[in-house]
Amino acid sequence: MLVYAGDTLAARGETEAAIELYQLSATTEPHAGGPARWLEAALSSQLWLMAATAAEYAGKATDDDSERAAHLHLAAVIAMDKALNAPRAMAYLRAALAAEPGHRDAFVRLRLLLEEDAAHDELAEMLSQRLDREEDRVQRIELHRAVADLHRNFLSDRDVAKRHYRAI
């Protein structure tokens, strides 16, 4: 019901009022299409943080892990590239990887943000978890090297570093 009312307001050019109804719909009846309409309206209005939040709600509205990861990844991309909000982007990327651990771009983006933030412990943990899943030999070598470098240069754990260097 709220989505239809929002559509009517949007058609009349009352975007702010439509967004309020879509937002309300997303929180009260998420499977009625409110998150998708909210996202669309926020994107077209260039309300980046609101668009990221709407994408997050769209992810919460689905039971499919792959679809949830896609929405959370979209939220992260908006937060990172448009809103320039690294902490929110990191939270969305963590959630996307929790829903779909093999999501390549979410992994690459979170790795970049963790490196920029000098979050060495979390980065080493994330790379080690990825190493457990990675099947590509070249990627495994790069991950071993990165984990070894982190432990040698920042985490003062030469034994772990040696173990990963030997695996190369």
Image (cartoon, helix red, strand yellow):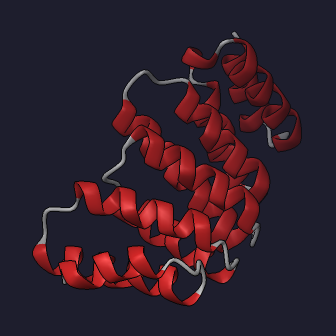
* Depth order, front residue of 151/68: 151
Q: Residue at x 49, y 69 (%)?
A: 124
**Quarter of the image where the C terminus is located:** bottom left
Furthest residue toward front = 159
130, above or below 114, in the image: above
Q: Is residue 29 left or right of residue 151?
A: right
Number of marks in the rendered image = 0
* Depth order, front residue of 106/50: 106
Q: Position of residue 85 (x, y in %)?
A: 76, 67
92, above or below 22, in the image: below
Q: Where is residue 93 in the image (x, y as percent from the top left)?
A: 55, 55
11, above or below 156, in the image: above
111, above or below 60, in the image: below
Location of residue 69 (image quadrant): top left
Q: Position of residue 21 (x, y in %)?
A: 80, 25
Q: Which residue is drawn at 60% across and 67% down?
A: 121
* Depth order, front residue of 26/1: 26
Location of residue 57 (image quadrant): top right
